Image: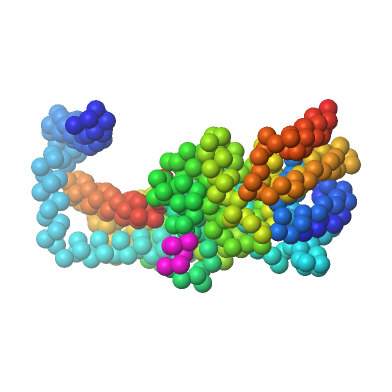
Amino acid sequence: MKVNGLSFSYGEKVIFKDFYLDAPNGKVTCIMGSSGGGKTTLLNCISGQLDFEGQILYGQNGQNDIKQKSISYVFQQPRLIPSMTVEKNIEYVLPSSMPKEQRRTRVKEFIEKMQLSDCAGSYPRYISGGQASRASLARALVFESDILLMDEPFKGLDIKLKRQILETLTPLIKGKTVVFVTHDIEEALLMADSVYVLDRVDGAGVKIVGKEDVSQPREDRDIYSDQLNTTRQNIYRLLTDVKK
Amino acid sequence: MTGKENRKKLYLLLNLTIPIATLVVALAVYAIVSKAVGIELLVPSIPNIIKKFFLLFAQSSFYKAVAGTVGRAALSYFLSFAFAIILAVATKMCPYLRRALSPIILLVRIMPTMSIILIALIWFNSFQSTILVAFCVIFPMLYTSFCDAIESVDKDLIEMSKTYKIDRKRMIFKMYLPQALPVAFTGIKSSIGLNLKLVIAAEVLAQTADSIGVYMQLSKIILDTSTLLAWTAVAIILGGIFELIVIVIEKKAVKGR
């Protein structure tokens, strides 16, 4: 996936001005940076929620417009429909053409994977923030898409649960083009194939201040290994420079 | 039994007994006033009103009057509802329509109901006047309420549905309606009883044949206060039934709250 010359402003406030970014197909690209730095706006442009100038292309030769692709999105807020149970919220995104039995099996599978069995029949207002985040994640994963966008998907989860969900997620996202936003370096090291650090300069828009690649296979990553410790320090340095 | 269950039982008991107690007190106050005044023509006794109330059921004209009023109330409400929903949806698609309609809505809303009734009586026959009067008051209420209901739908959920390319039919039935209905029902509940009151008021002035209003007017002319109050009780019961129907529909339609 290629972001080519993206320009977007909120009124007078320039967010992107001729911005370029490569998110290789089938790889996990992580976006980090300071708050208000345009990370969510970038995901919203990719998902087609915002009208922008420039191109976001997808495909082997990067020739297809992103709008033709199916996208699933784990939003920063879970965005669950209050009148539907967790189970129905997950089922909501499945195509109407899918047979009922198949829908049920698929939803059940992801409810179990995301450890939501206890609250599958509950309405969103009766579940915890962590359960809502997992429901949003399950909804994004149950939907068969070319691209998966995630905006701080593990917010509100305790470390143990986050580790379990990340382990569950690893095989599910294999071969998928994933762009995810996080503030957590550990999440980035566990998930990403490449990490971009962004910063926004008033008037000039968002710029890439650095990029780190993580080459170890996701399944065998030890985030405390020397190699990943170096990557962690590099990302940390880039992020703290951004904050200055 | 746990403390939580006990509290729930007490809560339900209080919910039921407090309104009944209020009603009993109000009836007791009325009975005392009736006794103190001692003139059946002015403040008839409760037993006499109850007697007249049941006597109404023995007359075939009673059923015709109730059917006529209910029919007119239903027709006027249906028209107000249909126009309000069509225009609210049109307003969502073309926001300038709300601006265009706002002077008319404001004018009809602040115009005294009695003026509407009198003007309608000059221009139309009694049947049309009754419908028009109720329409002129109820339509703006429902239109505003439906516009607010559509606006109340969470924009984030609309964006989420668009991202997942959810088809329009599913979006309407699974996302828009369940979110908009609670707001819409607030307007429906407050207007359904008022609609009946307006129809009866218009029937009184328009002398509409086979109507509760005309029998109320007749009772007033012949100074049969107990029958007038018996008809009032009929109107209250009908209004209560309408509101109950709306509450039942709301309970079935609105989930997860």
Which of the pair A101/A18 is nearer the observer? Answer: A101
In this rendering, would A201 be left or right of A187?
right
In this rendering, would A99 be left or right of A152?
left
Q: Where is residue B153 in the image (x, y as percent from the top left)?
A: 55, 51
Q: Position of residue B74 (x, y in %)?
A: 36, 62
B120 vs A236: above or below: below
Q: Which residue is drawn at 77% across and 35% down?
A: A230
Part of the protein shown in magenta:
A101-106
Name the main secondary structure of what is drawn in magenta. helix
Q: Residue at x 24, y 57 (%)?
A: B215
A181 vs B195: above or below: above
Q: Is residue B12 magenta?
A: no
- Quarter of the image containing the N terminus of chain A? bottom right
Q: Which residue is drawn at 40% across and 45% down?
A: A118
Which of the pair A29/B156 is nearer the observer? Answer: A29
Q: Residue at x 74, y 62 (%)?
A: A66
